[in-house]
Amino acid sequence: MIKNALILLALIAAAGIGYWVATSLYKKKVEEQISSNSTVLLEKIQKVCKLVTVEGQFSELYDETNIRQFTLYLPLPTTWKFSKQAIIKVNGTVLVGYDMEKVSIEVDSANREIRLSNLPKPSILSIDHNTEYKNLEDSFFNSFDIEDYNRLNKNAKAVLAEKAKESGLLEEASQQGNQMIDAIRFMVESAGWSLVVASPTPLVPADSLLQN
């Protein structure tokens, strides 16, 4: 009888352990299940003609602090301050060049002349960036929400645009544009034609740029 009882207890214990293991694995499997869904929306397709002449790589730390004040008028006015702070690392690629959509090209076959007009000034064509949140600190009465994250991402992109302007990328793109015009003029004149460029600013010869 004792032997049978021990066998029964062993079977009950084995069944209990098996149930516990199976339950744990099932819970772990359920907890690790991730559901995802994506919807691609195509809003607009348009033809573009942009000439990229300079590319800049940037990495910046963006720090933003927001303070919200609450004042209660007890026997004496009392003000509480609740702050939130975000420190973001921003990595991005800035493309600078020319939007050529409005450029006008006229060909005068009788005078063997090509005229270029409405040449644009160099500008920032695109900014491809990603953000990495290094630190987020908020308080109970001043916490981060979706609008905050959208604003932080927008401000981080604006920081890259400002850094690109300060770095001299636009000036370098202008020099590249001048050299491109000189290269076009050389090819046109080699074919026995002449090139007339109507530009709001005088073009700098490529030779002079190479000497600087």
Image (spheres, rainbow, N blue to C red):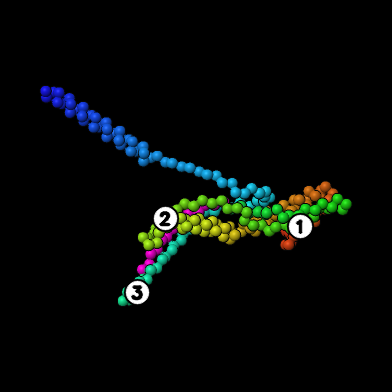
The disc label shown at residue 117, or none = 1
> In the image as oriented, which residue stretches furthest toward the left?
1
Residue lying at 21% horizontally and 30% vertically, measured from the top left = 13
Q: CA distance from mark 2 to mark 1?
A: 50 Å
Which quadrant is the N terminus positioned in? top left
Mark 3 residue type: Tyr
The residue nearer to you, when weighing 188 against 39, is 39
* Occupied quadrant, residue 169: bottom right
SS assignment for the magenta stretch, majority: strand
- Place of residue 59 in the rendered image (x, y in percent of width and height, measured from the top left): 52, 54
Report which residue position mark 3 lands on. 73
Residue lying at 13% horizontally and 23% vertically, measured from the top left = 3
User: Under tag 1, what secondary structure?
Assistant: strand
- Place of residue 71 in the rendered image (x, y in percent of width and height, measured from the top left): 37, 71
The disc label shown at residue 135, or none = 2
Mark 2 residue type: Asn
- Place of residue 56 in the rendered image (x, y in percent of width and height, measured from the top left): 59, 53
Disc 2 to disc 1: CB gap under 8 Å: no
Q: Which residues are magenta?
A: 80-93
Is 161 in the magenta?
no
